[in-house]
Image (cartoon, rainbow, N blue to C red):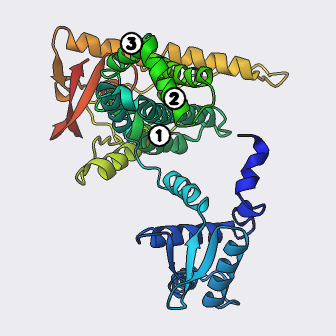
Amino acid sequence: MNTHQIYEILPEHFFSVLACTNQVEYADCLFLMFHYLGKGNSFGGKKESIIELLSTYFNQSNNDNKQIPREKAIGVLRRLRQCGWIFEEEDANYEVIVNFTSYAIPLLKTLSDLKKSEALEYLGYIFIIYSAVKNMEIDSLSDILDQIYYNTTIVMNKLKSLNANIKKYIQDLLNKKDVNDLKSIVSNLFVDYKKNIIDKHYQRLKTSENISKYRPFIISKLNEISMNESIIKKVSYDLVKKEKYSELSKAKSHIYDQIDYIISSFENFEHIMSEIDKKNSKYIHTSISKILFIVNNSQDLQGKINLILRHYVKQKKMNQGVKEECVFNLFPQKYLAPNSLYTMPDKTYVNSVQTIESEISLSFEEKQKKFKNFFESNVYNLKHINSYVKQLLNKKERILASSLPLNNYVDYTKLILIYMYSGSDVDYSVDKLNQIYQNQGYLFYDFEIRRK
């Protein structure tokens, strides 16, 4: 489609209601009407009922006391009609019926799906493709190829969108002005990113909705068809007969293009998933490295760790129905017992201090290099934790977190990071159990560590 043709379908001022000062109110009204009218047999309803619906909305929002809600609702309908979103007609009883225009319905459906941001069922599309390929009939091959091509584009676009979304999270993290904003980093990692990326998409693609098992059959079957000249010729004649193409050569080219796109898409699936894996690992790696950097350079170490755990526990409670007890509890030791192993440091007195003549400043590249060196040399990075878990597992297939050595702060930090890193590219996975383990005043829900 050429760029100018869109306004041969849509009115000139169609998008103006979503770009004006009252854009939020117009958007709310459109969605209210869309869901209300969508319950019937058609996207149409009595004007008076819609006015009452919008009047209730404006009465509840109460943003403008100078205008009566009913008058405002009528004004919104008038503006939507002028911009081409709706049209009015009279029925047999002379009642005015408000309808959405044909082009407004698919746009509102798309906007509604974006607004809901529901989990995407990748496997549903793949199974439709798999079933269509498996039960393919030559007489209806052109229609089946159209269906397979359409569903393949949906799957690939969703995968590319997931890839782009993770990249955006990484970019937002790297562009964060306040590098010491621990609360924001922890919240993004444990709440926002986990909810919108890991739970809805990534984890399902790696487990229950893994596409790989259907991929070889789909590619093999389509390759057979593309190499069968008689089948391609017959389908091409069918397309010309249906007047979809005027020439046989163009029909053939169309069929080959569709098959090539489908095959190349499924062949590139592993590459796209590899890119998604890398970006997911990079985001988790970068987030944890920033958290560790802030924690290790903070005066209030215990406070920072507690902040991380509070966010983590809050998310676990929301998603998995965790009880009132925390997953991990760390208690600050304010007083030293007489038999404490802690040794008070001797005070050191410096006779003279050399004056720093000029302000020391580091370039952005130097800061990044120091930050990278700090993390890579840190015993808490992904590589060290993964090796630590492999050493713990040894020849075992699984172990309990409660069986790990938990004698000090370092051990508990490693325990937390084992759980945190489990969603990354590591050689183990974890399953949370509903058993609370207590040791030396610390409480946490036990979990099983399994070799992949």
Q: Position of residue 139 (x, y in %)?
A: 37, 29
Q: Quadrant of the N terminus?
A: top right
Q: Quadrant of the C terminus?
A: top left
| Distance in Å between CA atoms under marks 1 and 3 | 42 Å
| Secondary-structure class at tag 3 | helix
Going by the image, does 39 lie left or right of 320?
Answer: right
Amino acid found under the numbered disc labelled 3 = Glu
Residue appearing at x 40%, y 70% in the figure: 39
Q: Position of residue 106 (x, y in %)?
A: 55, 55
- Give the class, few, some or many, for how many residues have Cα within 10 Å of label 1's Cα (few <14, many ≥20): many
| Distance in Å between CA atoms under marks 2 and 3 | 41 Å
Going by the image, does 65 lie left or right of 449?
Answer: right
Question: In the rendered structure, which disc, 1 or 3, sits on the residue that comes first in sequence?
Answer: 1
Q: Position of residue 200 (x, y in %)?
A: 39, 41
Say the numbered circle drawn on residue 148.
none
Q: Give the mark toward the camera: 1 or 3.
A: 3
Quick one: 447 or 344, which is closer to the camera? 447
Amino acid found under the numbered disc labelled 2 = Tyr
Residue at the spot of label 1: 193
Going by the image, does 73 lie left or right of 384?
Answer: right
Q: Are marks 2 and 1 in contact (CB under 8 Å)?
A: yes
Residue at the spot of label 3: 224
Quick one: 23 or 134, which is closer to the camera? 134
Residue at the spot of label 2: 283
